[in-house]
Image: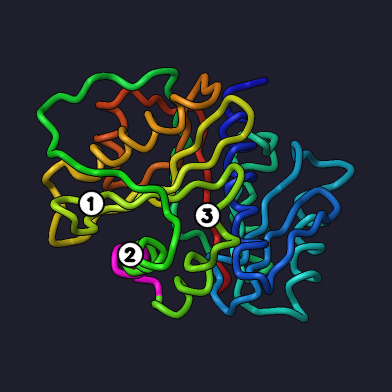
Amino acid sequence: MQDFLIVEDNLRTAMRFFGYATGTGEIAALPGSVVMNSGLDYGVFNIAMLDGAVGQAGLTLEKRLAAMAHYFMPKTTRWSLWVCEDLLEQSVRRRARQVIGDFGLRAISHPPGMMAADLLPPQKALPPVEIQPVGGAPLQRAFTELTSISFEIPFAIAQAVYARDSAWHGEYRGFVGLADGRPVSIVALVQSGSTLGVYSLATHPNWRRQGYGEASMRAAIAMVAGNSNVERIVLQSTEAGYPLYKRMGFRDVTRFTVYLTK
């Protein structure tokens, strides 16, 4: 399988989390796409993704978008679309933003999809951190609070998604990094086959630029990889995190464009 498809497949698995974590959402297969509806009135947690390559014939981009819009219309006006640009034929890619804009969506970010077979050693000493899997009310609340603060998500929305026992199981694993017993960072990992994806890496604003995020990410990966067959690690990088991931050995293999309803 091509590298960009591996990254896209793991992201699709990760996004399915929002379809069942709240207990009020759903995951639905549409013609040429899949949607993960959280059941919340919060656009970035109601997600659509393309399923398969998109060309000028057959299931065109317009037909897929029409099916997505038809699905979300009676449920919510707020939804988002993740597009792996390597799924689009060149002629489709050139006009994709205009076509998607005609369906009421605007581009909000362009995260690169990255991959590493192994992590490079740290370039500096990292602070000691105790990594704990999310489980039980105290750690669920810590994960929820850090998510809300770090990503500026309303607490009630974050609580509806992350503070449920049913959310964390199987391939979905959340971790809280503790420094002297105090929650300072979070990491979410998603495994699909031999691929491990890193999501929701964040550090509390009061503890940033001290290495806690990198230390927590390395510790969580080591915990999961030590108990399963992991051949590669993937992620979608923010602009702020990109230099760190490059230093850790990740390389660009594709690019995504994230769209949100206007």
Q: Quadrant of residue 45?
A: bottom right
Principal secondary structure, stretch drawn in magenta: helix
Give the magenta part as a residue range.
Answer: 146-153
Q: Quadrant of residue 184?
A: bottom left
Nearer to me, 251 or 22 = 22
**Crowd around label 1: few <14 · some 14–19 · many ≥20 (10 Å):** some
Query: Which residue ends up furthest to the front in the rendered image?
Result: 136
196 is higher (above) or lower (below) than 27: above
153 is higher (above) or lower (below) than 109: below
Q: Earlier in the sequence, mark 1 or mark 3?
A: 1
Nearer to me, 199 or 127 = 127
Q: Secondary structure at mark 3?
A: strand
**Crowd around label 3: few <14 · some 14–19 · many ≥20 (10 Å):** many
Q: Earlier in the sequence, mark 2 or mark 3?
A: 2
Q: How is the image coloured?
A: rainbow
Mark toward the viewer: 1 or 3: 1
Residue type (three-letter) at the residue carrying disc 2: Ala
Q: What x and y, as percent, mark residue 205?
A: 18, 61
Q: Earlier in the sequence, mark 2 or mark 1?
A: 2
Q: Secondary structure at mark 2?
A: helix
Question: How far separated are the C-alphas under marks 2 and 1?
Answer: 10 Å
